[in-house]
Image (cartoon, grey):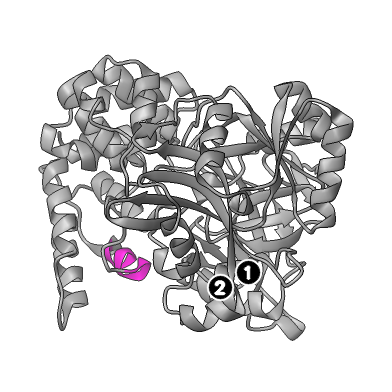
Amino acid sequence: MQLAELAAASNELASTASRLGKVALLRDALVKLEPAEREAGVAWLAGTLPGGRIGLGPAAVRELRDVPPAAVPTLTVGTAAERIERLRTVAGQGSAGRRREALRELFALATADEQSFLARLLLGELRQGALEGVMADAIAAAANLPAKDVRRAIMLAGEIAPVAAAALADGAAGLARFRLELYEPVRPMLATPAEDLASALDALGEAALEWKLDGARVQIHKGDAGVRIYSRTGRDVTASLPEIEAAIAALPVRRLIVDGEAIALDSGGRPRPFQDTMRRFGRKLDVGALRDELPMSLFCFDCLHAEGEDLIDAPARVRFARLAAHVPEAALVPRRVTRDLAEAERFLANALALGHEGLMAKALDAPYEAGNRGAAWLKVKVAHTLDLVVLAAEWGSGRRRGWLSNLHLGARDPAGGFVMLGKTFKGLTDEMLAWQTERLQALAIDTDGYVVRVRPELVVEIAFNELQRSPRYPAGLALRFARVLRYRPDKTADEADTIDTVRALAAR
């Protein structure tokens, strides 16, 4: 497939609001990709660069604006992907310069539209609205397969591109290759906010209520190769949690995959601040020293596999029973099964009294829908909070001079991009100001000297009193009395709350 065709499809995707229209555009593009181009082409259409960054920063990419474009398109998707991948192999002294030159050579072969597409791809600025659900439907249409089977394969693979390549090449047989495997983490099942306990019980009926812990999500695999612990993004964090690794290794079960939360508790059993828990996940920290200072506790709440039996399609009540059969009570999240509101409110009050955030309410007959934020899991918090994305920041004044302070906050738009909901500088400690100044400068796209616009990658948890109507922002809504609770390095921008969630909350 010509790169020019893919770039044109990308531009058309960005200007198409209809979900069905996007699916049709993606389907038509997918069937044109050559077999060797499919993984790269699908990832690019989804706005991602396989393998991550190529070792050149935004400034190096922007330098390519002065490269004269080719008059006639000659590049294929495969050729462009091969040249970009080759950049990763450049190493040693002077490697940055050689990568710059190689990238300049690629841009010299590209037309103006192709250059624009490649630059936005490399900068992480492709906002086409080709989100996972839309892409799954397009893959299903292109391969003439049920969309639910494609979504399940993506759930198990953790990536879209390999599933697309397999589906387009081998149909249903290709999808069948994606199974739950030990030491291959699947995406965690996610929860949708509920207004309160009453609405959660109205929606679910009898439900499993669990403490909502303010810790770090972990998925733990135990098999013949030992215990491995993965973060919610799939990163192997076993070395950061030796006490949890040892506890699972000691269990009298040979093969196990469990979902849970790792959390730092104080001497009284109350949760320490989230930042304390996240200190244990630093890549270059002395875990031995921190283990004594910040011991971690494990609370398991789901079981995906036990002793050769895959459980992700089993009802929650079955998974919970398997979990209790293999994990001791001390390592289980406190759970109460009820449909009685008074009993549920007592359980919530107990969780809050112990310093926890609220409750989770889970449907007892639902399967484990990895990577999905559906109605089977609901989260009930007392305070209004949203996970939003930092779109820009303003330089501070007075005692905050020299720090990026006032944050521009946006909710994710399922159609593509982000919708701004307001600004805040409240709740930021000096430590957070220093950290975010360094991090946001690394993500900077451009600046007018006062406002620094950044790549939308950082997720921040925001507390607020209410949502009010506002003609200032595109959604017609603004956060009132917004304040920063914490950054969420364990979440990606794709996991931020959507503008649909915000609008539903405003309607309630």
Q: Quadrant of residue 468?
A: top right
Residue 279 bears which disc, if any? 2
Q: What residue type is labelled 2?
A: Arg
Q: Name the residue under label 1.
A: 275
Q: Position of residue 267 (x, y in %)?
A: 73, 72
Q: Residues within 10 Å of mark 2 (few under 14, many from 20)?
A: some
Q: Is residue 94 above or below residue 334?
A: below
Main SS, magenta region, reads helix
Residue at x 55% of width, y 49% of height:
260
Relative image position of residue 318 (x, y in whole percent)? 54, 28
The label number, if any, that marks residue 456 in the structure image: none
For this view, does 355 lie left or right of residue 257?
right
Q: Are marks 2 and 1 in contact (CB under 8 Å)?
A: yes
| Side (left or right) of 131 relative to 265 | left
**What is the residue that sits farthest to the right in this orientation?**
342
In the rendered image, the quadrant that contains the N terminus is: top left
